[in-house]
Amino acid sequence: MIYEGSYYDQGGTISDPTYWYNDVAYYIERTHKLTLDKPCITIKIPFDRLGLDENVDQVVLSDFALREWVDHIEALNKLIYNRSRSDKENGAFYCFRPTNVVLQRNASFVEAISEKWYLCLMITVQLPFKNNDKAMRMLCKMLPKEVEDLIAKFDLIKLNAAYELVKKQNMIREWLKSSDYCAFIANGSILPRNKDNSGPLEGALPFISPEDIEVEICGLRGMGIKHGVTVITGGGYSGKSTVLDALNSGIYNHSIGDGREFVITDQSAMEISAEEGRSIKNINITPFIKWIPNSSAEQFSTHYASGSTSQAANIMEAINIGCKLLLIDEDRSATNFMIQDIKMRSLIKHEPITPFTERVRELYEAAHVSSVLVIGGSGEFLSVADQIILMDNFVPKNVTQEAKNLCEHDKPRERIPLTKWEIERKITTDHFSSYPQGSGTEKLMVSTMGYIMIGLISEGFTISHHTPSLQLLPF
């Protein structure tokens, strides 16, 4: 390897240390001052070595290359693996292992240097403790050799297939935007996941749409879900939550082999659940919570929300940032927020909660926000739904008319006053810290939605109506 272009900063350390092996650059930097034995390396491969031109779809290329590179990292680790030693003693190569969604990631990207384009792959290397010879061999021989192997095996035919898949997925997304539909599940999709959620469940039944709600989009046939209120129901273990999870994941494009390549959902969709214990600051939840003891429902704030107040806040925040499709599973919801039957209404005279059943139609008709609901334990939503799909052993059936017939003799619902869905929200904060006030301990938790949350929004830092949304990414 050739080292060039370096200089020393005032502290006497090397800045911009770039090594070259042929025409591939290896930019080495420390990850942290306390882990000098674990440097981060950005490998920069020129486009011409891979047979690429600068007009490629950079997101697809980066995603595809990272998936290919993971296999080479595993091959490197097999060569140096020693089960009797830890990684710190033995050395190891690490790189990010992507899920099956196609995204722009920090671990793989495209960069232009002096008008020349490079594919960049980031890895971390654990250098073996007190073994300089092995460290040199790992960095100067093994790693460059494996990169050359990646270049030699770079499959442009597979890459082109990935381009074509994303192109078709985006065509379906564009079609949905100008149609009466908010989601689409293509026939033949494999929705159930395997044990580690890394791909389709082997032997799972392919999805087949009911004929009477089947649509054709861009040459593909499948089940279309229209704007409005859709209920997915069925017995236990029938596949209803699996369908909702697939729709939730459908906001992203999926890679070849995932099984959900053509499960396409309105990209503004959000999964809503009860999140007991979350912090809330300055949000109007009066559409669902009329009053709260010793607090204000118009400007509701708390450091530890209940199931019902957290779900109400989640919906109002989603609407506030432009969500047009809510995905709700009753198993992840607060029961008293979702429904209240006639007997309970008669018994409870002083109820502050307006259940979601009373607002879901108004939410669509007034605010143009659709809902897909997984309901298995109550018939309260049947009378307000536009479309009802019954899952029977992972086979969907359209039972809308049958369900409506069951609701013919229901007592008419008492009309409740319409609410205001547009909210004005002003947020002030002194700081946003992972260390709550009065505590010396960092707050770290995993939510029931499958997200890692770092910190406590102790002074209510959140999003105003006109600011872009902040996202916690799935791990």
Image (cartoon, rainbow, N blue to C red):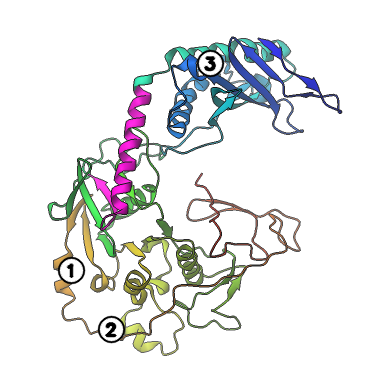
Q: Earlier in the sequence, mark 2 or mark 3?
A: 3
Is label 3 in a helix, a strand or a loop? helix
Q: Nearer the viewer, residue 80 or 468?
A: 468
Name the kind of residue labelled 2 in the image.
Arg
At x 71%, y 56%, the residue is 435
Name the kind of residue labelled 3 in the image.
Val
Task: Tell me where residue 30 appears, x and y as whole percent.
Answer: 71, 28
Q: Is residue 150 visible?
A: no
- Residue identified by numbered label 2: 413
Residue at the far front: name it.
115
Circle 2: is it few (<14), some (14-19), or many (20+) Cα within 10 Å? few
Is label 2 in a helix, a strand or a loop? loop
Task: Tell me where residue 345 appears, x and y as whole percent.
Answer: 36, 85
For residue 178: magenta?
Answer: yes
At x 25%, y 53%, the residue is 238
Specify the segment rendered in magenta. 158-186
Whole-Å distance between the Cαs marked 1 and 3?
59 Å
Q: Earlier in the sequence, mark 1 or mark 2?
A: 1
> From the viewer's perspective, is the residue at label 1 or at label 3 nearer?
3
Whole-Å distance between the Cαs marked 1 and 2?
17 Å
At x 34%, y 21%, the residue is 157
Q: Return the mark for residue 403.
A: 1
